[in-house]
Structures are given as structure tokens and as C-alpha cells.
Image: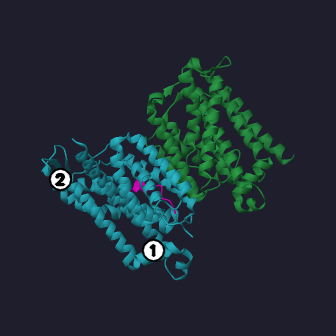
Chain colours: A green, B cyan
């Protein structure tokens, strides 16, 4: 079996398992997995920039929230149907990513991290400032009647699960395809050695910009879908915490691996879920995990797996 | 109140903010300058300082001045020790890699914050000021063609606020003396200029790093002890100082101490004045955008010299 068939088989296998799980999972975990799949799509978007291009953004909540509010506000204010609203969310996310990329890519390293952090903070504050429309911290609910797409009621758990599976599947397969295209290979080359990629004649800036926009659009897709599937849009999704989460998930699962974001999200979601039953200081777990990861396993789960067992893992 | 006295009141409040901000930001700037790492957990060292000040003040009891005096001596040392521990156990082991350090310090931020939540709790608690006399301030007005002094209602400050400003100035002079006039300062500056060369000349660079990290955290803690009688101690209070210190350090030029102090005074004062005229959220939006754009278009900071 060639490597690309093997990896395609593995990823389709994961989607098949998730499909079957829908019929056997108890209600509580059923809802959780739907949530995890959408959040994992967000992590996949983050991973394109961080894992494959080597750019660490500390402001991805800006894109997630741009998609979510782009979708939510047009539904709430103008009563657009869900699918058009989803497209508006994607468009807003893409434009925000383009603007941020044009500015932030003039810096590199630590300055890039701080610039993205600052822009995301400004975005979060903007959401609070326009509280008249966004309802600030409180957020707003998207009514069940507005969540019916093509006659499918997305608030129904089964439909929601399948919609989340579709969103996750699209994001996963897009990334899998991406890393096999020449464009994806150039991104990896930039991560490994930016100077050399430049010397070889690639336009590094354009490639990075495209990566920012693609990453932003996938994150916005996840954000808009999250709002649509779970019917709630709130300022907490724009806060620093939601910029740190995808970093945590991707580092845990393995940066620069296609499966890593899902593994990391799944693990962290249940870790926080279990610990929040014991203490209200559940973010402690996130902190300890971050420190432990930087110290002992910078490659993450899937990264270690690739290093030790399956060297062909994309 | 008329505009003049109102502006004076706003600037006085701004001066207190500026004093505390300068201490916190100099700590962050020192760490960035010498070690070339960004410490995202800096705000939590600030918060830890405030919470420990409350704890020590409560431990002693009696005259509030005794508890406060003990806090101002021991809290920076305690927080500094925590920071040294963090440096030795975590940062040293990842070899001060700039990006991994940011990720690790984000982790430390959550650890310190959440452990405080578990032990100290979610309440905001005050510390009593050691002295707190209300001082009315005069204002001048022209009537009959000559200035006359009067005391407008509401224009006042407290002796403690003036004390905070004085203490901050004294500490900043102390830091300057330490950096410019002592052997330790010389060693720190040598490490900042060229780590490899310093190592080759037998400077124990790792010890210098631990010391600088401890000193930076200690300054943040000291700033927190000074402010905690005015602003209560709370487990989430580290967020704003972190953001403001970032802004100050970037505007002042990364790693430049005089620039940092100048920027702190500028931003502390304008924060007070801007908040009077605009909504505080809008002021914050403009400030964060300004910082991001400064980093994009003028990475050496507004006051920093362009590096050759």
C-alpha cells in the first residue's frame, strides 16, 4: 500500500468510527463529541498556521469570533437564512485574516505573537464596546427557528452530530490534501528554513499570507458552525482563553500532524470536563499540561507516535 | 467642579497609576532586556504580591503600619523566590527558547492564578493603608485681575497616594543605581549585550538569568503591595497590569529602561485623562491597536533607537 492510500484510509477510518459512534454513544457524550468535532476543526485551522507554517499566533480567537459574530449578527439583525449567514461568517473571517496577515506578517517571532495577541484583544474589546448589538459578555441566543438549514433542524442532537461530523470531515480532508500539494510542501519548507525557501525562489510572504487566510477561514468556519449548532454567540469566545485553547489542543495532539488537533481536543475536553466536576479551578489543568508539554513532549501525542512508530503519518 | 481642578485630579490619579505601572513594566522590561524572553506570567507575579500582602497583613494584626511594613519587605522576596524557582525548574530546562518560553509562561500564568483561586478564593479583599490622611488641594482663580487661592470641593488626595508616588520614584532610582553603578549591574548588562562573550569571560550566565527573573517578579510584587491599599487584592487582578506593562514596554522600546519609565509616565497620565473624556473600553481598544501598530511599523519602540 502506498503511503497516501494508507493515510487516506486512516483518516477516513476515523470519520467512519465517528459516524458509527453516533448510534451507540449515550446522550451526554454524544453532545460532547459533537462539540469536540467542531472545536477540533478550529484546532485544525490553527494547526495550518502553527504546525505547518511555523507561525505561532496568540490571537486566533479573533478569527473564531469573526466567523461566529459574522454569522450570528446577520441572523440576529437581518434574519438571513443559516447557510447565507454561514457564508457571511466565512467571508468576514477571511477578510479579518487578510487584514491581520498584511499587518502582522511584517513582524516575526515574538513580535508576531504579541501583535496577534494585541489585535485579538482589540477585537474582544470591540465586541464589548458594541454591546448594543452583541450584548457583550452576556451574548445572544440564536433561536431554534433560525437554525433550520435546508429543512434540517440543526438543534436536534442527531442532526447536530452529523453536521459537526461533516464540518470536521471537510476540515480534516482539506488539511490532508493541503499537506500533499506543492503549496503545502512550501509551507513546511518555510517552517523548516525560511531563508532557504526564499533562496529557492518562493515568495515567502505570499505563501505565509495565504496560510494566514486559509487558517483564518477554517477557524471562522468552526466559529460560525459552533454558533449555529449550539445556538449561542458570546464575547467569551473572543477572549484570550479561546486563543490559548487551540494552541493547547494542537501542542497536546501534535503540531504539524493532521490527526493531532482532534486527539488533543478530545483529550483536553474530557480532562477539563472531568476536573471541573472536582474543582472550579479547572484551568489549573490547562496550565500544568502546557508546562509539562513544553518540558517533556514538545511533539505531542501524534508527533511522538510519528517519531517512534508510524513514520509515514502526515 | 470646573475643568482645571478636574484635570488636576485626573492627573494626580494618573500619576499613581503611572508610578505603579513604571515599577511593573520595568520588571518586565528587565527580564526581556537581559534574558530576551517574554514573561506572560508577569501579571500573575503582580497578583501574587497583592494576595501575599493581604496574607501577611492579616497574619500580624495590630497596627496596620506594622503589617504593611513587613509585607513591603517580605512579599517581593517571596515572589522573587517563586520566580527563581520557576526559572530554574522550567525556563532553564527549555533553554530560554523565546517561543517555548511564551507557551510555558502561559501555563505558569494559569497555574499561579488557579492555585490562588483554590487557596485564597474568588473574593476581593482590602489591605489597610499604613497612613491615610486626606489632603485638600488648593486651586487658583482670577478675579478682580489677580489670582486668588481657594479650595474647590472634591479636589483632594491622600497622603498615602503621594507616598506611593514617592516610593516608586525611590525604587526606580534604586534600580538605576543597581544597573549602572554596581558590579551585579555590570554583570547583567554584560549578559544583555552578548551572552556568549559573557559566558566566555566566566560570568555565571544561568545565575544572572535566575537573579534577573527573580528581580523582575519582585518589582511587580512590590508595585502590587504599594497599590493594594487603594485597589483590593483579587485573583484576576493580574490581567490589566500585564496588558499595560506590555504596552509600556513596547512603546518605550523593548528592553530599554529609561524608555520604559518615560512610556509608563506618559501612559499612566494619559490613561487617567483619556478615561475622563472617552469610554474606558474605547481607550483600551485604541491603546491595544496603537501598540500592535507600533510593533508592526516601528518595532524599536517610539523612544528606542534603531538597532544597527
Q: Secondary structure at mark 2?
A: loop
**Magenta residue check for B305:** no
> Looking at the image, is B248 positioned above or below residue A37?
below
Tell me residue A83's x, y (percent): 66, 24
Q: Which of A258 and A182 lies nearest the eye of the viewer? A: A182
Chain of the residue displaying label 1? B
Chain of the residue displaying label 2? B
Q: What residue is rendered at 38% in x and 57% in y?
A: B264
Q: Secondary structure at mark 1?
A: helix
Mark 2 and mark 1 residues within 8 Å of each other at the beta carbon: no
Residues at marks 2 and 1, CA–CA distance in whole angstroms: 38 Å
Crowd band around label 2 with a 10 angstrom C-alpha radius: few (<14), some (14–19), many (20+)? some
Q: Which residue is mark 2?
A: B132
**Magenta residue check for B43:** yes
> Looking at the rendering, in which quadrant would you find the N terminus of chain B?
top left
Tell me residue A88's x, y (percent): 63, 30
First in sequence, mark 2 or 1: give its number.
Answer: 2
Q: Which residue is mark 1?
A: B188
Residue B183 lies in quadrant: bottom left
Which residues are the magenta region? B37-45
Q: Which of B41 and B246 lies nearest the eye of the viewer? A: B246
Q: What residue is rendered at 59% in x and 56% in y?
A: A107
> Looking at the rendering, in which quadrant would you find the C terminus of chain B?
bottom right
Q: Which of A42 and A81 lies nearest the eye of the viewer? A: A81
Amino acid at each position: 500500500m502506498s503511503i497516501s492510500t494508507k493515510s487516506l484510509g486512516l483518516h477516513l477510518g476515523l470519520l467512519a468510527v465517528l459516524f458509527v459512534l453516533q448510534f451507540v454513544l449515550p446522550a451526554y457524550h454524544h453532545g460532547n463529541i459533537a462539540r469536540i468535532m467542531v472545536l477540533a476543526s478550529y484546532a485544525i485551522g490553527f494547526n495550518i498556521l502553527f504546525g505547518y507554517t511555523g507561525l505561532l499566533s496568540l490571537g486566533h480567537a479573533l478569527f473564531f469570533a469573526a466567523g461566529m459574530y459574522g454569522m450570528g449578527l446577520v441572523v440576529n439583525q437581518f434574519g438571513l437564512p443559516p447557510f447565507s449567514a454561514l457564508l457571511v461568517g466565512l467571508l468576514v473571517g477571511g477578510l479579518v485574516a487578510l487584514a491581520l496577515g498584511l499587518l502582522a506578517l511584517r513582524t516575526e517571532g515574538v513580535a508576531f505573537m504579541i501583535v496577534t495577541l494585541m489585535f485579538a484583544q482589540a477585537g474582544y474589546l470591540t465586541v464589548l464596546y458594541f454591546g448594543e448589538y452583541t450584548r457583550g459578555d452576556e451574548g445572544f441566543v440564536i433561536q431554534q427557528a433560525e437554525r433550520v438549514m435546508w429543512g434540517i433542524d440543526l438543534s436536534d442532537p442527531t442532526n447536530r452530530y452529523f453536521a459537526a461530523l461533516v464540518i470536521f470531515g471537510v476540515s480534516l480532508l482539506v488539511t490532508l490534501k493541503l499537506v500533499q500539494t506543492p503549496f503545502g510542501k512550501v509551507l513546511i519548507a518555510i517552517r523548516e528554513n525560511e531563508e532557504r525557501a526564499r533562496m529557492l525562489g518562493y515568495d515567502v510572504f505570499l505563501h505565509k499570507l495565504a496560510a494566514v487566510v486559509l487558517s483564518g477561514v477554517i477557524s471562522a468556519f468552526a466559529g460560525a458552525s459552533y454558533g449555529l449548532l449550539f445556538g449561542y454567540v458570546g464575547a467569551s469566545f473572543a477572549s484570550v482563553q479561546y486563543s490559548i485553547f487551540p494552541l493547547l489542543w494542537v501542542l497536546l495532539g501534535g503540531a504539524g500532524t493532521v490527526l493531532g488537533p482532534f486527539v488533543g481536543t478530545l483529550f483536553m475536553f474530557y480532562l477539563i470536563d472531568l476536573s471541573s466536576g472536582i474543582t472550579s479551578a479547572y484551568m489549573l489543568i490547562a496550565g500544568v499540561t502546557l508546562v509539562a508539554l513544553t518540558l517533556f513532549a514538545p511533539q505531542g501525542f501524534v508527533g511522538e507516535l510519528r517519531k517512534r512508530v508510524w513514520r509515514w503519518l502526515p | 467642579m470646573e475643568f482645571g481642578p478636574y484635570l488636576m485630579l485626573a492627573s494626580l490619579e494618573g500619576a499613581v497609576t503611572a508610578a505603579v505601572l513604571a515599577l511593573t513594566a520595568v520588571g518586565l522590561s528587565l527580564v526581556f532586556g537581559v534574558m530576551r524572553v517574554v514573561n506572560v506570567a508577569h501579571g500573575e507575579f503582580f497578583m501574587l504580591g497583592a494576595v501575599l500582602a493581604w496574607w501577611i497583613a492579616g497574619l500580624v494584626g495590630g497596627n496596620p503600619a506594622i503589617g504593611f511594613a513587613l509585607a513591603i519587605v517580605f512579599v517581593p522576596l517571596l515572589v522573587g523566590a517563586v520566580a527563581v524557582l520557576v526559572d530554574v525548574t522550567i525556563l532553564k530546562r527549555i533553554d530560554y527558547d523565546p517561543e517555548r518560553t511564551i507557551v510555558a509562561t502561559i501555563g505558569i500564568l494559569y497555574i499561579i492564578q488557579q492555585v490562588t483561586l483554590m487557596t485564597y478564593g474568588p473574593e476581593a479583599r482590602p489591605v489597610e493603608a499604613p497612613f491615610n490622611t486626606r489632603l485638600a488641594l488648593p486651586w487658583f482663580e482670577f478675579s478682580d485681575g489677580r489670582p486668588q487661592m481657594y479650595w474647590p470641593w472634591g479636589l483632594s488626595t491622600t497622603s498615602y497616594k503621594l507616598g506611593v508616588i514617592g516610593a516608586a520614584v525611590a525604587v526606580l532610582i534604586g534600580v538605576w543605581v543597581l544597573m549602572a553603578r554596581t558590579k551585579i549591574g555590570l554583570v547583567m548588562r554584560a549578559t544583555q549585550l552578548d551572552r556568549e562573550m559573557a559566558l566566555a569571560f566566566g560570568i555565571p550566565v544561568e545565575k544572572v538569568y535566575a537573579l534577573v527573573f527573580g528581580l523582575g517578579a519582585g518589582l511587580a510584587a512590590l508595585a502590587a503591595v504599594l497599590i493594594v491599599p487603594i485597589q483590593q487584592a483579587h485573583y484576576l487582578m493580574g490581567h490589566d497590569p500585564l496588558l499595560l506593562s506590555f504596552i509600556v514596554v513596547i512603546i518605550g522600546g523593548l528592553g530599554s529602561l529609561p524608555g520604559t519609565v518615560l512610556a509608563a509616565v506618559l501612559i499612566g497620565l494619559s490613561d487617567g485623562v483619556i478615561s475622563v473624556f472617552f469610554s474606558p473600553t474605547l481607550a483600551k481598544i485604541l491603546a491595544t491597536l496603537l501598540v500592535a501598530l507600533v510593533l508592526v511599523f516601528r518595532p524599536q519602540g517610539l523612544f528606542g533607537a534603531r538597532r544597527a
